[in-house]
Amino acid sequence: MSPFQMVSQLKIIVKFVGWVFPLVDEELGRWRLKAAASPDEVLAAQALASIRDKRFHAQGGSVYALYPGVEMKGFVALVVALQTISDYLDNLCDRVGLEDEKAFRRLHLAMTEALSPGVDPSDYYTYYPHHEDGGYLQELVRECQSQVAKLPGYFLVQEDVLFLAGLYSDLQTYKHLPLAIREEKMIEWLEPYMVGNPDFSKWEFAAATGSTLGMFMLCAAAANPRLTREEAARIKEAYFPWVSGLHILLDYFIDQQEDEGTGDLNFITYYPNRQQCGERLGWFLEQSLIKVKKLSQPLFHLTVIEGLLAMYLSDPKTGQEPVRTVSAQLLRTAGRRTGLFHGLCKFLRKKKVI
């Protein structure tokens, strides 16, 4: 990579931390006030916990506010609202002792309706034991709808965005079911998608469905009034399952010990050993890099991928085996720039910026 390209990457990172992070905090602060006003104490607690504990999800997704042609403030509002829906629903499915497929599926209508401008928000709590959130979830949905409606090329990507949101909702519905039926239900759901897809396992495909990055990137591309269907298709192909799969496999990778202790589903456990885990993560990295080189603005996407590795592999949880060895291997594979970004992320963690 030329010095000019390296400087361009550094500019993206400086803008990300200096410009985008404050906008994310502003938006999260707005939703925090709304969450705190929820009449139901359980819903309020889960909404506030999702904002407090998963802030870095909104920060990471908001990198797409820097994609060329995107209106930064409005796009940050979209990313924060959609990611807040995602994180809030995850808490509602995971932390109140409920294991009801019908309730989980109804809750996750919020994800697809948020990306469907003009659709009236549903009563998402119909089958849930708590109901009165003071309009919190519906307001998040309306915020997303208002932002995607401003994107001139959204009509070109909406079908793909809703496809990804639907897969995401399916995953969240099935992964929170009782352990005795969870795996059987997931296999039944995943089998049709495996036809003609020999390059990855059903569990790797499932991991890829858990990422919101493809939705964000397609929306960012839709800010361009000259977006073509061909470019939209290339973006989807690059991000799903490759960039999305890398994203979520890294997330599960660093959470192995934590999930083992709680009994939570972790797709990394389906690899038979540490060697195959490292090889498959390296494969997803390699394929992601190959695919994004074919897109417009390849340097932007490269920065996103290197930033993903740097952010996840700088987590303190990577200091323990078996995670540490595979982390070092991935950083070597990714190259020197990722190593530099990794050092920067460790510094930002120390300063509690991320």
Image (cartoon, rainbow, N blue to C red):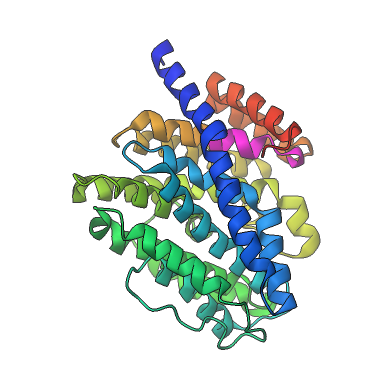
Quadrant location of the N terminus in the rendered image = top left
As drawn, 154 above or below 116: above
Q: Can residue 333 be spotted in the picture?
A: yes
Q: Position of residue 39 (x, y in %)?
A: 69, 79
Classify residue 88 by image quadrant.
bottom right
Left or right relative to 269: residue 116: left
Left or right relative to 326: residue 41: right
Query: Is residue 313 covered in magenta?
Result: yes
The residue range painted magenta reads 307-317
> How many numbered circles are shown?
0
Classify residue 192 by image quadrant.
bottom left
Q: Position of residue 338 (x, y in %)?
A: 56, 26
Classify residue 68 by image quadrant.
top left
Quadrant location of the C terminus in the rendered image = top right
| Residue at 65% in and 72% down | 92
- Nearest to the observer: residue 124 or residue 320: 124
Left or right relative to 211: residue 29: right
- Nearest to the observer: residue 162 or residue 182: 162
| Residue at 51% in and 81% down | 106
Q: Can residue 187 be spotted in the picture?
A: no
Q: Position of residue 211 (x, y in %)?
A: 50, 54
| Residue at 30% in and 47% down | 223
| Residue at 42% in and 21% down | 8
Q: Residue furthest top?
A: 3
Q: Position of residue 89 (x, y in %)?
A: 59, 69
- Magenta span: chief secondary structure: helix
Query: Is residue 126 covered in magenta?
Result: no
